[in-house]
């Protein structure tokens, strides 16, 4: 295990078909003025909205709403929500939705009492909040981002073509609690389910493809990856399979709740490329990752050969006997590629609306991280994006 670290994850999880009952115990811990935050209306169609509103009323809460939080929430929507929360003198923010709604609630939480422009402070200068923040609770309806148990909040600025994630260092930005009822995810369209599955898988890859040390986090990651592959194959054929969907939900939370990054360096370049593609196309997050992954991993493979070989053998069951390292590693990526196609993931950014004319701009918006096997220069970013195009 590298370096010195502390580990504390303060989010309390409630899991299972009766998980929402926990709201009755959680709500009294917070003040009367609650802002209920949700997306474009899926929770009204599947009945989750009614269940939540009933519990808020039973708890005697004074409720205001921020509705219409879009996938890839924008900075303008953030400003709008901050005004609503201020006017309501909010004591508590309850996010009911996917990663976009949970991220957005955290962004409102750090902005309500912030006197500066939150975009500039948190997404340009990457500062920590210097004001009081509001507690956030999540009722999760879409699986993938891990936002329910982390301090990440991704906001898109369509005016500058930037999609930026800030992972706050302060644990108080993590949700106080999260309600994980796998049944809530059964109404997700297949496209969102598949995108979420790849998001989970890639979060693990981002933390796995780095370092050469013998690290317990990598063994946990291999187990999580095997579980995601197994459950995804069942869910892909039978989306209503509770066991598979519940396994995916639990794996998603552990894939990005700070556990498997402990004591190691991490990469995050697929996310940086994917987020920049998202800033230009507003495409679904998991699909942007899928579309850039193979060109990226094939590009860095020579710099991280031992790990790619281990990935092939331990995650994809490639038989290494009598094969050169390069062949073993490539067979691992080929197995991943065929699994991705099986799930129906986007394999090219052109499928998501990206064009050749956008490549330079997408490259400009790609933040370069330094924790992986190769620090990319601009020419390499452009090359990977071109290979991802079609
Ligand atoms: O808006 P509604 O009508 O609710 O519809 C949503 C939305 O259109 C729909 N949906 C959600 N639950 C549903 C449902 N439809 C039917 N039944 C349900 N139960 O699904 C669509 C996508 O929802 P969204 O919240 O956008 O998806 P996701 O959870 O993938 O979140 C994506 C956002 O999270 C960020 C992404 O960049 C993106 O902005 N991320 C956050 C991270 C974090 N906090 O650590 C890390 C991730 O890497 C990611 O960057
Ligand atoms: Zn992600």
Image (cartoon, rainbow, N blue to C red):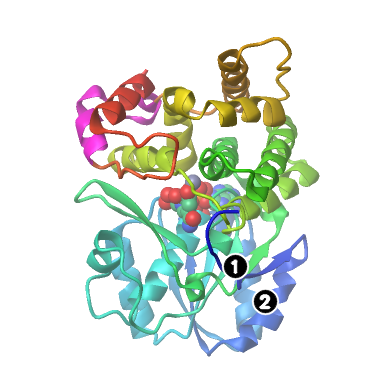
In this picture, residue 214 sits left or right of residue 120: right
The answer to whether residue 71 is seen in the rendering is no
Q: Is residue 356 magenta?
A: yes
Q: Nearer the viewer, residue 90 or 223?
A: 223
Instruction: Look at the image and tell me in which quarter the N terminus lies.
Output: bottom right
Identify residue for label 1: 7
Residue position for label 2: 23
- Looking at the rendering, the stretch of residues picked out in magenta corresponds to 349-364
Q: Is residue 75 left or right of residue 23?
A: left
Number of residues whose C-alpha sits closer than 10 Å to that of mark 2, classed few (under 14), some (14–19) or many (20 or more): some
Q: Which percent across, then down, holds residue 40?
A: 45, 55
Q: Residue at x 47, y 72 (%)?
A: 173
Left or right? Give the position of 185 relative to 282: right
Q: Earlier in the sequence, mark 1 or mark 2?
A: 1
Q: Quadrant of residue 128?
A: bottom left
- Give the percent coordinates (x, y) of residue 33: 48, 86
- Is residue 358 positioned above or below 178 on the image? above
């Amino acid at each position: 295990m590298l370096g010195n670290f502390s580990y504390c994850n303060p989010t309390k999880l409630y899991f299972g078909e009766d998980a929402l009952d926990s709201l009755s115990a959680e709500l009294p811990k917070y003040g009367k003025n609650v802002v209920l935050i949700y997306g474009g209306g899926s929770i009204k169609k599947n009945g989750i909205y009614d269940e939540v509103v009933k519990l808020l009323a039973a708890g005697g809460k004074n409720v205001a709403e921020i509705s219409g939080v879009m996938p890839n929430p924008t900075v303008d929507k953030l400003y709008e929500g901050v005004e609503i929360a201020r006017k309501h003198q909010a004591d508590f923010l309850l996010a009911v939705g996917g990663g976009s709604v949970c991220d957005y609630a955290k962004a409102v939480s750090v902005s309500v009492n912030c006197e500066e422009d939150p975009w500039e402070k948190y997404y340009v200068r990457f500062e920590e909040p210097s004001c009081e923040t509001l507690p956030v609770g999540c009722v999760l309806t879409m699986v993938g981002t891990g936002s329910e148990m982390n301090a990440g909040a991704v906001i898109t600025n369509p005016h500058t073509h930037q999609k930026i994630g800030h992972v706050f260092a302060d644990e108080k930005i993590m949700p106080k609690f999260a309600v994980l009822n796998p049944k809530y995810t059964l109404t997700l369209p297949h496209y969102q389910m598949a995108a979420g599955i790849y998001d989970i898988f890639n979060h693990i890859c981002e933390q796995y493809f780095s370092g050469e040390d013998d690290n317990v986090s990598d063994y946990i990651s291999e187990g999580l990856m095997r579980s995601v592959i197994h459950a995804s194959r069942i869910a892909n054929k039978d989306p209503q399979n509770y066991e598979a969907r519940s396994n995916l939900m639990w794996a998603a939370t552990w894939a990005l709740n700070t556990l498997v990054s402990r004591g190691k360096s991490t990469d995050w370049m697929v996310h940086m490329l994917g987020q920049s593609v998202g800033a230009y196309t507003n495409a679904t997050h998991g699909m942007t990752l899928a579309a850039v992954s193979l060109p990226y991993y094939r590009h860095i493979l020579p710099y991280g050969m031992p790990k790619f070989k281990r990935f092939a053998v331990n995650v994809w069951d490639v038989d290494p006997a009598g094969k050169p390292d390069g062949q073993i590693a490539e067979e691992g990526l080929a197995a991943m590629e065929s699994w991705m196609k099986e799930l129906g993931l986007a394999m090219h950014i052109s499928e998501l609306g990206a064009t050749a004319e956008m490549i330079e701009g997408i490259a400009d918006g790609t933040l370069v991280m330094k924790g992986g096997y190769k620090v990319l220069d601009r020419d390499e970013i452009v090359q990977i994006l071109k290979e991802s195009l079609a």
